[in-house]
Amino acid sequence: MSTAVHSAQELRELVWQWRQDFPLLQRTVYGKPIVYLDNAATTQKPTAVVAALQHYYTECTSNVHRGVYYLSEQATQLYEEARRTVQRFLGAAEAAEIVFVRGTTEAINLVAHCLGRTRIRPGSEILLTHMEHHSNIVPWQLVAEQTGARLRVLPITPDGELMLEAYPELLTERTAVVAVVHVSNSLGTINPVAELIQTAHERGIPVLVDGAQAVAHMPVDVQQLDCDFYAFSGHKIYGPTGIGVLYAKRRWLEEFPPYQGGGDMIRHVTFERTLYNDVPYKFEAGTPNIAGAIGLKAALEYVQQCGLERIAAHEHELLRYATERLQELPGVRLIGTAQRKAAIISFVIEGVHPHDVGTVLDREGIAIRVGHHCTQPVMEFFGVPATSRVSFGLYNTLEEVDRLVEALWKVIRLFGVGGNG
Ligand code: C6P
């Protein structure tokens, strides 16, 4: 099937077809058809992913890289095919640059830990941005404490964009690494990561990109970006929980010491000394999430079959329409109004706590996330304790946006916002 971007009408019809692939979307909550708008937290799973998990568990359960028997060879083949699928999906130069981990959080911890042991020294600087998820702050803080390095932070603007003019001065001869989110999970901002990487590389500084909120919403090519590290989670791209990916250029994986020790990451062990396995296995200690990797392969194939350009075009239309409609509502303030945004809208309603918004919406069958979204520095910047956040996936529709707006009117009337009591 061609993945060329279709007309708006064709896209809408396709979305109704895609929806059939997600059994959960057929269910009701409180007697109402579910409207699932919390895709940044996790996505629903298509039947292809559930079938891939079931196939592994019912047909080839066995461990990988260890057995000489048929089942184990089959499981190993599926697991390694999954690695090659991720490689192609990200445009990586070789499958050995794909490390399976639990998720974005573990991928970032791995890089922080390893850089902490190889490159980060007392006085080193770790450059983050003000819009990072806690997963891309705390691991670096831990490393800074251990090594005597310090964190530096690229500020953001009131629109929720990076203050790019401040970037070059923040890159010094002490900067050991730049770690930046591709798409902000609380603001929706798409950051110009290719430019940030190029500027850092001109100074010989490696860059980690947190792609947790990007890969399901736009095509990503790590060789084009030229990032040193790219992290994402399977469960945010229609795959299983507990599986994620660290892409790292081979030279880093060769240079890094192992992150964890255990089975499968070794070549030879004596009590005196251990010889480590080749990359990427050096970083996959213990029995991996075999089913997860196989499920992730099915998810990536599913997304590619839908077409990331088409998904992006459809979600852009949802974002445009929802932004327009939310702005019509009294007392609504959008948090994050960047020029380039993906699939996420954060907002507050004057005088109403986001938890109340979430609870009223829940009774209408609408699932959104309320809270600080693990980005407390962002909340502090905007002077709010929390926001309500709507985040789209490929299966959301304009009709669902209408239901959201209707439910928000209920909130507005219930709390008498702007005299609408
Ligand atoms: N954000 C959200 O509702 P894990 O938990 O490892 O799969 O992903 C962590 C993570 C890292 N970076 C970004 C930009 C993220 O959005 C997330 C997860 C979820 O926004 C849960 S807090």
Image (tube, helix red, strand yellow):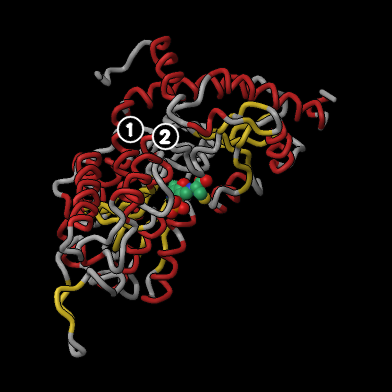
Q: Tag 2: Cα neighbours inside 10 Å, few (<14), some, or many (≥20)?
A: many
- The spot of residue 162 in percent (x, y) is 43, 42
Quadrant the N terminus occupies: top left
**Is residue 311 visible to the viewer in this orientation of the structure?**
yes
Position of residue 363 relative to residue 249, above or below, is above
The numbered disc on residue 302 is 1
Q: Is mark 1 within 8 Å of ligand 1?
A: no
Relative placement, left or right, of 207 versus 102 is: left
Which residue appears at 39% of the width and 43% of the height? 239
| Mark 2 or 1, nearer chain start | 2
**Looking at the picture, which amino acid does disc 1 mark?**
Tyr
Relative placement, left or right, of 328 versus 373 is: right
Position of residue 111 relative to residue 56, above or below, is below
**Is residue 252 visible to the viewer in this orientation of the structure?**
no
- The spot of residue 67 in percent (x, y) is 19, 64
Relative placement, left or right, of 315 versus 365 is: left
The numbered disc on residue 46 is 2
Q: Quadrant of residue 263?
A: bottom left
Q: Tag 1: Cα neighbours inside 10 Å, few (<14), some, or many (≥20)?
A: many
Q: Is mark 2 within 8 Å of ligand 1?
A: no
Q: Quadrant of residue 311?
A: top left
- The spot of residue 49 in percent (x, y) is 37, 39
The numbered disc on residue 261 is none
The answer to the question of whether label 2 and label 1 lie on touching residues, with beta carbons closer than 8 A, is yes
